[in-house]
Image (spheres, rainbow, N blue to C red):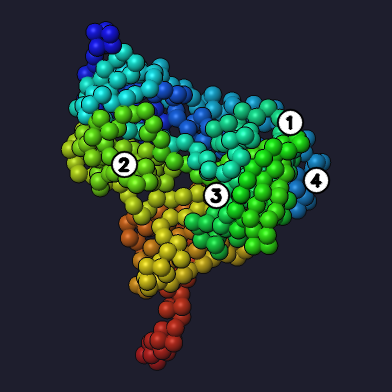
């Protein structure tokens, strides 16, 4: 029956998924004259707009506002305790999403000439995708299907109500006690935000907080979380979840023995995984590796050379800015037939808790594990005049350079770290030397001076060396 009534569409490019990567690819290809079909089963805009970057940063902004009175007191301005209206906070979150949604809407993309189909896609063969009764035959395909929250196989968890980043923004009342399972970026950001809004918060992490980041840069955030009353359980493995009066109980295994925590709500923040369920990849000749990730070559192509992947579906870090970069790579390959590949090193990552943590390139521990020779340059915000003026002096800039001064990686812990990391991204990307940044004229007083000061730390010891002093003495004798 389906074969007799199916509507057939032909396209130059069929994009599966209307998140950050898929939308960028569809818009770019359409504006370059390609016939584009865009398929989305859920909300346009994907996770970032609807349940990820946008609502979380709106919530973080509201939570930060709740701390302004305490900050102002140190500057001689007194406020009373904040009156937090959680419903109004969530109203701000939802209004923010709604304000941005038209940019990602079906109407906007249809106006561009993109054929937008709503429904689930499934490959029928290597060159055809089905969406309901429609059949799409395309010259090239892109899998931009995003990711989903990873829910660990914790005994008892299936019998306990729990939140993920996809459901937490639907809360109508502030949790009494939020237990966060996972001390990564999502866990730290949301845990701190809910604590600032008035909830008790406990973060449980099997390893250490933000385990993939430089411990020296994580430490300012750890201190801030503890100072704000967040209970941290690092090195604690969750063993079992069960219902309890007024919420749930989590049993932990720690070095000191078994421990139990009770809370009203549980937020599972254990990372994200690519999701290819129901796509019919086998029939399309698209292979997965042993970890369930797409097997990709250096050009983001799957084992079916007509099918590319982008964004979270490509299996790398789940960053919207990386998804946008992937979009450019795919367009170069698909439309211009250029053998382009994605950036591997200069991909910044930011944890938007407070103080913010931003890094690009390898960490100190990673370089040591590789046996690389390098030097560490540092500049503390305590030594920065703007930070002193604002009364926010915690954190530092940390830079890793080769013995000849080429920048390998950098990290910043402190206010606006995500904004301040850009010159270091460029330095890693272009293979610049610390001296290139040290010689830049930076406005005063700004926090950017901390980056310049860190860079100057490479050549100042060399400049003021005994060798330089001997040269000055010699020139002085010559008149």
Q: In the image, residue 97 lies at what x, y percent?
A: 54, 28
Do residues under tags 1 and 3 come within 8 Å of each other at their CB atoms?
no
Element marked by disc 1: loop
Is tag 4's residue or tag 3's residue first in the polypeptide sequence?
4
Which of the labelled discs sits on residue 78, or is there none? 4
Q: Are marks 2 and 1 in contact (CB under 8 Å)?
A: no
Q: Which mark's residue is nearer the viewer, 1 or 3?
A: 3
Q: CA distance from mark 1 to mark 3?
A: 27 Å
Residue closest to the eye, 282 or 84 = 282
Residue depicted at x 53% and y 43%: 153
Nearest the viewer among 403 and 51 is 51
Q: Nearer the viewer, mark 4 or mark 1?
A: 1
Q: What crowding class fits label 2: few (fewer than 14 Cα within 10 Å), some (14-19), or many (20 or more)? A: some
Side of 38 relative to 242 (left or right): left
- Determine whether the residue tagged by mark 4 lies in a helix, strand or loop: loop
Distance of label 4 from label 3 (alpha carbons):
35 Å
Residue density around tag 4, few if under 14, some if 14–19, many if 20 or more, within 10 Å: few
* Secondary element at tag 3: loop
Q: Which disc, if any, is residue 184?
A: 3
Mark 1, residue position = 85
Choose top left, top right, bottom left or bottom right for residue 68.
top right
């Amino acid at each position: 029956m389906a074969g007799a009534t199916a509507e057939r569409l032909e396209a130059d490019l069929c994009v599966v998924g209307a998140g950050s990567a898929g939308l960028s690819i569809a818009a770019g290809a359409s504006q370059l004259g390609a016939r584009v079909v865009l398929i989305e089963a859920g909300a346009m805009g994907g996770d970032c707009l609807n349940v990820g970057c946008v609502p979380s940063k709106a919530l973080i902004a509201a939570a930060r506002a709740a701390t302004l009175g305490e900050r102002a007191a140190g500057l001689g301005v007194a406020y009373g305790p904040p009156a937090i209206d959680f419903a109004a906070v969530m109203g701000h979150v939802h209004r923010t999403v709604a304000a941005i949604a038209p940019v990602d809407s079906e109407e906007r993309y249809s106006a561009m000439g993109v054929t937008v189909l709503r429904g689930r896609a499934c490959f029928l063969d290597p060159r055809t995708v089905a969406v309901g009764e429609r059949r799409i035959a395309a010259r090239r395909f892109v899998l931009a299907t995003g990711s989903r929250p990873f829910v660990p196989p914790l005994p008892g968890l299936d019998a306990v109500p729990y939140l993920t980043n996809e459901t937490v923004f639907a809360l109508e009342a502030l949790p009494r006690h939020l237990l966060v399972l996972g001390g990564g970026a999502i866990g730290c950001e949301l845990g701190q935000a809910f604590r600032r809004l008035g909830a008790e918060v406990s973060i449980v992490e099997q390893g250490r907080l933000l385990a993939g980041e430089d411990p020296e840069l994580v430490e300012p955030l750890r201190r801030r979380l503890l100072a704000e009353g967040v209970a941290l359980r690092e090195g604690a493995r969750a063993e079992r979840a069960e219902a309890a009066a007024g919420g749930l109980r989590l049993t932990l295994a720690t070095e000191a023995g078994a421990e139990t925590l009770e809370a009203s709500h549980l937020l599972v923040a254990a990372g994200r995984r690519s999701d290819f369920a129901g796509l019919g990849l086998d029939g399309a000749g698209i292979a997965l590796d042993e970890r369930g990730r797409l097997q990709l070559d250096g050009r983001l192509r799957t084992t079916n050379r007509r099918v590319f992947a982008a964004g979270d579906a490509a299996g790398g870090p789940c960053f919207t800015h990386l998804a946008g970069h992937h979009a450019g790579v795919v367009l170069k390959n698909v439309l211009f037939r250029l053998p382009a590949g994605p950036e591997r090193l200069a991909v910044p990552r930011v944890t938007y808790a407070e103080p913010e943590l931003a890094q690009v390139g390898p960490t100190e521990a990673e370089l040591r594990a590789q046996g690389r020779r390098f030097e560490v340059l540092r500049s503390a915000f305590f030594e920065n005049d703007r930070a002193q003026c604002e009364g926010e002096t915690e954190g530092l800039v940390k830079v890793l350079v080769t013995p000849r001064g080429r920048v390998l990686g950098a990290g910043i812990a402190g206010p606006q770290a995500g904004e301040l990391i850009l010159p270091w991204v460029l330095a890693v990307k272009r293979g610049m030397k610390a001296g290139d940044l040290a010689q830049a004229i930076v406005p005063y007083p700004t926090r950017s001076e901390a980056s310049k000061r860190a860079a100057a730390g490479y050549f100042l010891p060399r400049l003021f060396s005994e060798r330089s002093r001997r040269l000055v003495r010699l020139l002085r004798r010559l008149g």
